Amino acid sequence: MIKFNYKYCIAAIIIFLVEVLIALYVKDEIIRPYGGDFLVVMLVYCALKSIVNLPVKTAAIAVLLFAYCIEFLQYVRIVDVLGIKNRALRIIIGTSFEWGDIVAYTLGVITIVLIEKARAKKFSTL
């Protein structure tokens, strides 16, 4: 089950760098909040698949549930409940719940599944 996959690792690194660039340089009301959430599920998925050999649907559902859990923790204001003051940690965990984030996570995971399906189809025809 545990198996390193360098392709997913490289994808995770690239997505992470894009996320950092968005966080540092994009100051809008669409790409930064929703594009970042759309990409973060892809980042987590690629990071997971880089170390664990799971079926696509299993990994995708696990990542989506994880994202939903984080959003729920934002809803209950977990960073305030735990008294977290560290700015970086507050940004990583998040401090506010938004339904738009749920939509972005869902669309990101749907995109992952569609990409993986297209990749599988491409390789099965070779």
Image: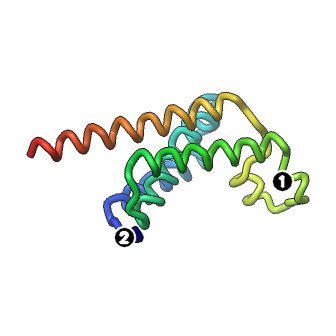
Residue at the farthest left position: 126
Look at 37% across and 58% down and name the residue there.
8
* Left or right, 90 with reference to 82: left
* Residue toward you, 73 or 12: 73
What amino acid does circle 2 point to?
Lys
The location of residue 108, given as percent across then percent down, is 49, 37
| Residue wearing tag 2 | 3
Q: Determine whether the residue tagged by mark 2 lies in a helix, strand or loop.
A: loop
* Left or right, 78 with reference to 6: right
Indicate which label's residue lies in the foreground, 1 or 2: 2
Q: Earlier in the sequence, mark 1 or mark 2?
A: 2
* Left or right, 121 with reference to 96: left
State which quadrant residue 67 falls in: top right
Q: Are marks 1 and 2 in contact (CB under 8 Å)?
A: no
The location of residue 96, given as percent across then percent down, is 78, 40
* Residue toward you, 25 or 124: 124
Look at 89% across and 52% down and name the residue there.
80
Look at 78% across and 44% down and name the residue there.
74
The location of residue 33, given as percent across then percent down, is 64, 36
The location of residue 4, given as percent across then percent down, is 36, 70
Q: Determine whether the residue tagged by mark 1 lies in a helix, strand or loop.
A: helix
| Residue wearing tag 1 | 79
What amino acid does circle 1 point to?
Val
**Cα gap from disc 1 to disc 2, whole angstroms:** 34 Å
Q: Residues within 10 Å of mark 2 (few under 14, many from 20)?
A: few
Q: Residues within 10 Å of mark 1 (few under 14, many from 20)?
A: some
- Number of marks in the rendered image: 2
Look at 90% across and 59% down and name the residue there.
83
The quadrant the N terminus occupies is bottom left
